[in-house]
Each structure stands twice: as C-alpha cells, then as structure tokens.
Image: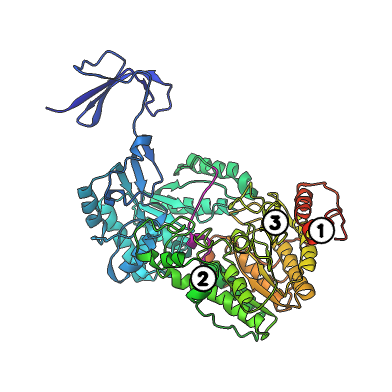
Amino acid sequence: MTDTRLLTGAQLADGTGSALRPADVLITGGTITAVQPPGRIPHPDPTDLSGLVLAPGFIDAHSHADNAPLLHSTDTTKVLQGVTTEVVGNCGFSLAPRTGEHAEAVDGFLQRLFPPQDPAWTGFGELFARTDEAGYPTNHCPLIGHGTLRIAAMGMTDAAPDDTALRTMRTALEEGMNAGAFRLSTGLIYPPAVFSTTDELIALARTLGGDGLYVTHLRDEGAHLLDSIEEALRIGLVAGRTHLSHLKAAGRDNWGAMPTALSRIAQARHTGAAVSQDVYPYTASSTMLTATLHPVRLDLAMRLAGSLGVLDGVEPVAPRTATDEELQLVHRPDYLAAVRAAPTSAWDVGHGLGTDDNPIFDRMHEASALIAGGSLTAAEQVVSGRVNRAVSISGGLHHAMAERAAGFCVYNDCAVAIAWMLEQGVERVAYIDVDVHHGDGVQAAFYDDPRVLTVSLHQHPYTLWPGTGFASEVGGTGADGTAVNVPLPPGTDDAGWLRAFHAVVPSVLQAFRPQVLVTQCGADAHREDPLADLSLTVDGQRSTYRSLRELAEQYADGKWLVLGGGGYSLFRVVPRAWTHLLATVLDRDLDPATTIPEQWVSHAVRVADNVPLPTSLTDGGDGTFQPWSGVTLSPVDTAIRDARHAVFPLHGLDPADTRD
C-alpha cells in the first residue's frame, strides 16, 4: 500500500508569488498529489500544522555541496532551512572529470573547496554511481565545471587550448551531460578559467546544442561588471540560456552600476534571451587566495617595468627558502607543523587553514617559506651594506599571526624579515604599511617591542576587515607609542590620503630615528580595487612611494626594504602601481603620461580577456594635497587628529602643533 500523508491547518505559500492561503496538501509516496481548500481531502490520520506556513522545498541555486553525499554523516543543515534541492558544480568546480595524466592536478584544484578524499571515479557516470549509492541529503542538480574540464584536458596552465585540448573538453562535456549533469558552469576569476578567452567558452557552449544552460561566476564583478555581463550574454546566446551567479557590484565606487546591470539584463530578456540571476542576501563576500593574490599580477608588473626599461641592468637575486629557525622568530613551531601537514591532513586542521581566505594547497609550506625567504634575502642585501635598497615584490603578507594564517597570508614575511634584522644587531626598525587593510600581523608581532615602530594607514576598521587598527592601539607596556594607526574613512582620495600621511608619518619617523625603513606597499587602496573602498589613483600611489623614498633617505640613512602586499585589480592597477614603485626604488622615476608599451598590451590582453587595459601610467591625478592645518574640517582631518593625539605625546611631540 502506498504511504500517504495529509497536511492540514497551515497557511500555504505555493511558490507562485500569490498571497498565503489555507489549504490541505496530500503527499503520496513522497510526491505532492493534491492541493485543495481545507476539508476537501479525506484522510484517516491528518497531520495538523495549525499556526505554521507550508511551502514547497526551496532551491539553493548556488551551492558548493557537491561532496555532501560522500561525507560519512547525515547532513541536515540545508533541509532544516527548508532547502530540498541544490544546484552544485558552480563557479567552474565539479568533482568530475578527472581522467588521464592530469587527474592529480584536478584533485589539487578541487581541494580548494573540498576536503581531500580518495576518488574512485574518473567521469560523471562513475561519480554519480558512487553518490547514488551513498544517498543525497538533498536533491542535487550538478553542473559541469569548466575549471575541472580545462585542467583534466591540459593541466593547470595559462596557455590557450589547442584543437586537441578543446576537443577533449568538448568530449568530456558531452559525456557528463549524457551521464545526467546539467550543462556548464564557469568561474572566470579563478585559475585556470581566468586565462580562458570568450572564444574558448563559446566553443564549449556550442556543445550544449543551443538548448543548454551556461551558469557563470562573472569575469569581473567590480569596475568591469557591465563588460562581464556582455561576455556572459554572448556565451549564453550560443548555449541557449544564461544564469549569472551571485550578481553584485563589488566595491563602493561600483555600487551605482547595479541599476544599469539590471536594465541590461531586462533588455536582453525583452529581446528574447533566456537570462536569470541569483543574489545572496548579505553585504559581504569571500573568495580564495588564487583569485586575489594571483601570480599574474606579479608577472604583469615585472613585464611592464621591463618593457619600460625600468629593470635594465638590474640583476635579480634568487630568493632562498626561509629556515624553520627563521620562521620561528615570529611563528610557533606547532603552526609550522600544521602548515606542513595541511595538504595531506584531515579537513579541519585549525590554525586558520582551510578557510576561504587561506585555502590549503599542495606544498603550502614550501611556497610560503620561499616567499618569506625572498624578503629575508632582500633584508640581507640591505643589512650587509651590499645595497641600500632592496625589493621583494611577492612579499608583504602582513596578516599572518604567530599561530595562524589570516587574510591570504600563511607566513608573515614582513615580521620575519624585521625579526631577523633585530637578530643581526639592528637596533631600531620602522615599518610603514600603506595597504588598504590594517597591518595587524606585523603590529601584533612587535606590539611590546620598543625596537620596532609600526605605522599603518588603512581603511577604517569599522568598514573593512580585519577590524583592527584604531588610533587608540599605540603599543604595549614599555613600547608605548611604537604602534601608530591612521584609520581613514571610505572614499578617501589622493589629497586626503597624502594629507594624512604627511601629517603623521614624517614626525614619528623623525622622533623614532630608525636605522632601516621597511615598507609594505599593497596597491589595494586604489579606487578600482574590488575588495575595499578607498579612492586613490596610481598617481597618488606614485606620490606615496616617492615620499617613502625621501623618508628613507632623511631618517634611515637610505636603508629601505620594500615589500609588495595586497592589490586585487590584477590587470589595470597592480602592474602600473608596482612599476612606479620599482622605478622609484631605482631612481628611474617615470612620467605618469608614459604610454603603455604595445608589447605589454599584446601579452596582457590574452590573460585579461575582456578587462579594458590601461593606456598610460596615469589615472589623471596630480598628487597634490593641502597640508593639515590643525583644524578639523573633514573625516580625514578627524583621523589625523585622533592619530596625533594618541601617539604624538608619547614621542614628545605636540599633537596640536602643525610644526610637529
């Protein structure tokens, strides 16, 4: 006899958008078979739901719970929220295919999202056989991830697919659909998809036959949102239908783009295109290390500097790997052990590892120790006297703490280099951090050490992670005044930033008298950076770098260790900002009006795809500012006042006297 159940007494939300209404719902064998006004369906044992609302199961249109059936536990978290169906395989990540010589590379790619496992499948057919056997906590609608397809066909590479690789991807896509997967997803900010062109994706979309579905994490959700929507519509027109994942306009300067974006989507629908989108109902987002600290930004910066002659005659020094003893000048031994073990450990390794901000990856310790070793190598050059200035552009990972990773940072190379210099006999080191995020890890490492002055100018902690860096944070007992923080309001532009910088930094440096100046030169205070809300131009950043050079000469006998840092506008901002930085360090200052060389553009256009590339080294700023007058007329002036009042008296300076 088929099991039946009658639900009565509830207010029904039927999913059509109509008003709540009382209704009885009959379920037969797990399927809704009747919906009638109250009292019209006879049943011997109805379930009374009086006072409750009854609705069909919700569909989570953007889930990454692909591996939920493979977890050895009953996961009811979604069902208890009313979710009964999940669309998985989003953002280009799917658990299959994993075939051929690149299966190991696929596994490494998937470990960014999923715990290490022992996959006993190659294609979707074998995967679904295993998940069917295990059982599903919810209904699954699996997409085929382009990132997985691409790596399975050609490995983790920035190269364009040749005919063989493209044919392999199309064949695997067809096999996945035949096995029951629901078409194609992309995550165009993540490697290797970031290297794919629109033409590559259109070629794959043709495999969908014109009645398929193209689901995409757009190539850019910030300054180039509208261009990215256009790209998605082009691909989706070939595929059949387009779905835009977690649609948003990221970054304060881009918030006004959303009405235009929605209007463009509506226009596409009006002309017959099948387009949909989802959003998440909160005002934050997260992503992973490879989408932000992507090595392409270093490559493009070095290529741009090289193409402009900045690096002519410069012999790079090969970095070495930091030893455990050197890393333990800052980090705890148990943390180093956890980093080493993380790639082969269970999912929850602790120490901040395995999170969206700090994903676990193969050879994590080795890669992170090499970055720290690069900054140590640069410090050695300066301390030894071989050079007065040295740059470790891949360094600047200032958030890592003694016992945990944080904010894309595994080992804190800034703090390790400073601690090493102290070990070598340097008596006073000043650290200036111009990243948009507070330099919390470096401050924490030396908060009680009077030998190190940490100065950080950053977006106000009330409005940006990590939520630290208030003016009241001035150093621990015995080190009062050696932590200096200037938290700036969102929207601060070149003039405001430079006014704050010059109202605070030179005075405390003069009072502290460092023997070496270390600077973290993150490029993410720029107005186009997608993760923050300050509004500098590359011209303002160039002025800052020139001021740092002058301060090193004036107060540190020319000894200047320069580190990189954040910066997530990979193609337009970081290459130009850091080209100016390198030129400044080498006293080869570039005219901001300099045209970007064609050889750089021809390379960058291949990896940037639809992102409009800059044509010159300027954003049109002039780097001028009004010096602080001692009068509080703006939110920036308030930040200046608070910083000066917090620390100036601790250095024997008058916070109200503009001469100090």
Is 285 in the magenta? yes
Q: Which residue matches tag 1?
A: 625
Picture coordinates of residue 78 (x, y %)?
36, 40
105 or 322, which is in the foreground? 322
Dominant secondary structure of the residues highlighted in magenta in the image: loop
The residue sitting at 55% across, 72% down in the picture is 299
Q: Which residue matches tag 2?
A: 328
Q: Amino acid at mark 2?
A: Gln
- As helix, strand or loop, the secondary structure at mark 2 comes to loop
Q: Is residue 532 rendered to the left or right of residue 660?
A: left
**Image-quadrant location for residue 77:** top left
Question: Which callout, 2 or 1, points at the residue further toward the start of the chain?
Answer: 2
127 or 497, which is in the foreground? 497
Q: How many marks?
A: 3
Q: CA distance from mark 3 to mark 2?
A: 25 Å
The magenta stretch is 283-294
The residue sitting at 88% across, 60% down in the picture is 659
- As helix, strand or loop, the secondary structure at mark 1 comes to loop
Q: Which residue matches tag 3?
A: 474
Q: Is residue 444 rendered to the left or right of residue 194?
A: right
- As helix, strand or loop, the secondary structure at mark 3 comes to loop
Question: Which callout, 3 or 1, points at the residue further toward the start of the chain?
Answer: 3
For the residues labelled 2 and 1, say whether their Cβ atoms are less than 8 Å apart: no
Picture coordinates of residue 627 (x, y %)?
84, 58
Q: Is residue 198 rendered to the left or right of residue 471?
A: left
Q: Amino acid at mark 1?
A: Phe
